[in-house]
Image: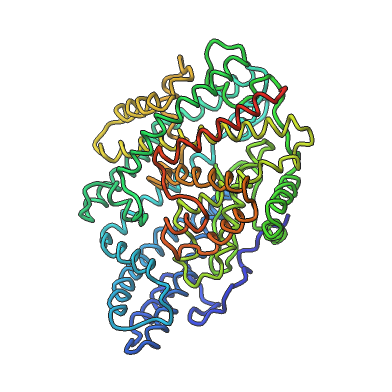
Amino acid sequence: MQRINFECLPKYNKREFVPSDLCLEDVTVIKSLYECILKQKVDSDDAYQLWFSRRAEMEIVLDELGTRLYIEMTCQTDDLALSQKYKRFVEEVLPVVKKYEHRLNEMYLEYDQHFSLKTDQYAIYKRDVSSDVEIFVDKNVDLQTRVQLLSQEYQERLGSLMINLDGREQTLIAASKRFLDPDRSVREMAWLAITQRRLQEKDKLNAVFNEMLRLRSAMAQNANCKDFTQYQFKEYHRFDYTIDKCKEYHQAVETVVVPLWKTILNKRQQQMGLYRLKPWDTSVDPSGLPALQPFQKTQDLVAGCQHILARINPMFGQKFAKMAEEGYLDLDNRKGKAPGGYQSSLNEARKPFIFMNSVGTDSDVKTLLHEAGHALHSLACAQQPILHYLHAPMEFCEVASMTMEMLSLDHLGVFYPQIDDQKRSIVKHLEDVIFILIWVATIDAFQHWIYEHPAHSDRERESAWLEIRRRFGGDLIDWTGHELAHANLWHKQLHIFEVPFYYIEYGIAQLGALRIWLNSKSDYAKAINDFKTALSWGGSKPLPELFMIAGIPFDFSQDTLGPLVEAVHSELKSLWKSSDF
């Protein structure tokens, strides 16, 4: 696979306002363009349309610039030049952009009272802009910049972590493959090495987060919000559910999902012949079989996922193949690469980019299919006219990715010719679905606690984390002797540092994906058609309507969660009964 040339990206639409030869990393240039928009005379519908189009083009061009710099930085966090370019963008460019965008938002709301655009499709946009204007405070721009720089520090710190294992230096992600080794002593040795290395960063990560917490609390206070929770809900445009609804989800998970998770862990414990499961016993095959090996080389991972996507829908396979051919994938794990995986859209080109850290495991297959779901979503709504509509609300974006994982389960023979290996992979995925519903509740409840108690100490935060873990079954694993590691396990969850309160989306979306999966079993053609139609609307429809178009309810109460969890349990019981592994 070739690497993407960011300097030669195509443009989906010809630019009409921003010259292609300008250096948009130069703040002076950006200011001159914004001033031109601000000073444009708007005295008719046509003038308003021109003003809006110029503003929309400016947004999308700068969005792509920031995305490109972020991608380059995360792909090689130890490249000082790339790190400095991104840092300069965050420190010098974004603060200027945010202030100009606020002024343009205010002008938009004013102009919209007197003039009309050539389309009436901007109701969602106007709603969201109104919310942005409501919470914008000039002095928060500097605070947001400082939080973004702390986020970059978090990325760089984790991306640099290495350990010596098996006589060689390797990344923590590469070393974590040992968690799949049937030899328990090998798993324990790797877990201890990784955990000890992470704990060496404990105080530094706490310091980073404490400063983030202080800055976020100040932002909420500046915006006259009760607390950062309220501020962030407005920032995320969460109009369709409330804080209380999130807590209702937590309760539903505790009531309905945790008992099934206990059943799953008890079965694992019995299969492994253990008195108690330790943290290094939760990923390995419980029957003592070697780890699944779906591919040897990254190109085999790409080819296999392309084949699966084509089976789900031929168009999906074609679009993914084009992405790979054009170099919009960076999949291999390596030193200096940021942890995790993501899909990010280069919105002026209307091209999606996938980033992950592949090391040859079964979970790598699921990760690439997940990110491919995001990428195909991005491509499906590429015709939407403005940046704001090129991405759906995150709750539905995650439906796209998780649905692709669920729909792939019938096609895993692409990677696993042996039927028992296919079953092992499916069982692991369905068990992971149950776990993610619990983990979402854990992370979301923890974040609610953090921002409801902003003056807490590190020790109080550890205690709250452990109490929340116990609530959601964290004590089903034996952490004896590793209490400090357990108390700081949350450090691994980058969302808590980088995108606060972005996690309930995964729970909401997982329920939507399960519903589409069940729909596909009764009427596959309709389920896929409804799914594709919903993807094409991007962010131009309200969240409940997107769910409705996809043929799924927008609800994450126990009424919806209970039957879906029971469907997963039923599928698992069938697989457990029929499997010889």
Vertical arrangement, residue 68 with respect to residue 58, above or below: above
Identified at 25% across, 49% down, the residue is 218
Identify the image quadrant of residue 514: top right
Identify the image quadrant of residue 134: bottom left
Q: How many marks?
A: 0
Left or right, residue 329 beside residue 266? right
Q: Position of residue 502 (x, y in %)?
A: 41, 46
Identified at 51% across, 33% down, the residue is 566
Foreground residue among 168 and 437: 437
Identify the image quadrant of residue 111: bottom left
Left or right, residue 340 beside residue 152? right
Vertical arrangement, residue 168 with respect to residue 132, above or below: above
Identified at 33% across, 73% down, the residue is 104
Q: Position of residue 355 (x, y in %)?
A: 59, 50
Left or right, residue 332 beside residue 343? right
Quarter holding the N terminus is: bottom right
Foreground residue among 281 and 210: 281
Q: Position of residue 160 (x, y in %)?
A: 54, 39
Q: Identify the residue at the far front of this view.
A: 522
Foreground residue among 484 and 427: 427
Vertical arrangement, residue 18 with respect to residue 6, above or below: below
Q: Is residue 368 visible?
A: no
Foreground residue among 467 and 413: 413
Identified at 36% across, 28% down, the residue is 468
Q: Position of residue 329 (x, y in %)?
A: 65, 54
Quarter holding the C terminus is: top right
Q: Is residue 362 visible?
A: yes
